[in-house]
Image (tube, grey):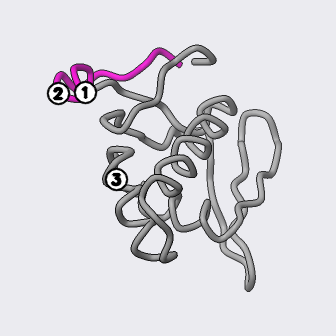
């Protein structure tokens, strides 16, 4: 997954490795296979919540821009960075547009 390209049309999907909990001021993911906790900032928590269902990067970026009142280019960069980090940790899987249409995703 390290070399996977993440673009606006990439679909993101949570993997089954992570469980999440919400504390008063933060959201924490627990990688159940590695036993590692990942603390999410407000942006990451918002994105993780939206990924209850698979979503495209561009869709997430539009929502993020609106929610946090930032321009879409910055929001797109933030979503791609989040996706890259979560995919590196195997907490998200990525699907290209063709794979998403066929119901497939990048190998985990």
Mark 2 surroundings: few (<14), some (14-19) or many (≥20) residues within 10 A: few
Q: Which mark is residue 82?
A: none
**Marker disc for residue 97:** 1
Question: Looking at the image, is 78 positioned above or below residue 88?
Answer: below
Q: Is residue 40 positioned above or below 22 on the image?
A: above
Q: Is residue 103 found inside the magenta-colored segment of the image?
A: yes
Q: Position of residue 97 (x, y in %)?
A: 25, 27
Which numbered disc, 1 or 3, marks the residue closer to the eye? 1
Which labelled disc corresponds to residue 53? Answer: 3
Give the secondary structure at mark 1: helix
Residue 61, position as x, y percentages in the image: 41, 56
Give the extent of the magenta segment: 97-108
Determine the CA span between mark 3 and mark 2.
Answer: 15 Å
Calculate the distance from the C-alpha at mark 1 to the C-alpha at mark 3.
Answer: 16 Å
The nearer-to-camera label among 3 and 2 is: 2
Using residue 76 as the reference point, say whether residue 101 is left or right of it.
Answer: left
Vertical relation: 52 (above or below) 101: below
Residue 48 point in image, percent of width and height: 53, 58
Of residue 107 and residue 47, the one placed in the foreground of this image is 47
Residue contact between numbered discs 2 and 1, judged by CB atoms under 8 Å: yes
| Residue, disc 2 | 101
């Amino acid at each position: 997954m390290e070399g996977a390209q993440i673009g606006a049309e990439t679909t993101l999907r949570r993997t089954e490795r992570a469980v999440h909990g919400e504390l008063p001021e933060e959201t924490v993911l627990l990688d159940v296979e590695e036993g590692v906790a990942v603390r999410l900032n407000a942006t990451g928590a918002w994105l993780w919540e939206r990924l209850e269902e698979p979503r495209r990067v561009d869709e997430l970026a539009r929502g993020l821009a609106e929610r946090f009142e930032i321009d879409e280019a910055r929001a797109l960069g933030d979503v791609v960075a989040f996706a890259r980090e979560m995919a590196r940790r195997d907490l998200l899987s990525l699907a290209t547009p063709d794979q998403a249409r066929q119901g497939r995703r990048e190998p985990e």
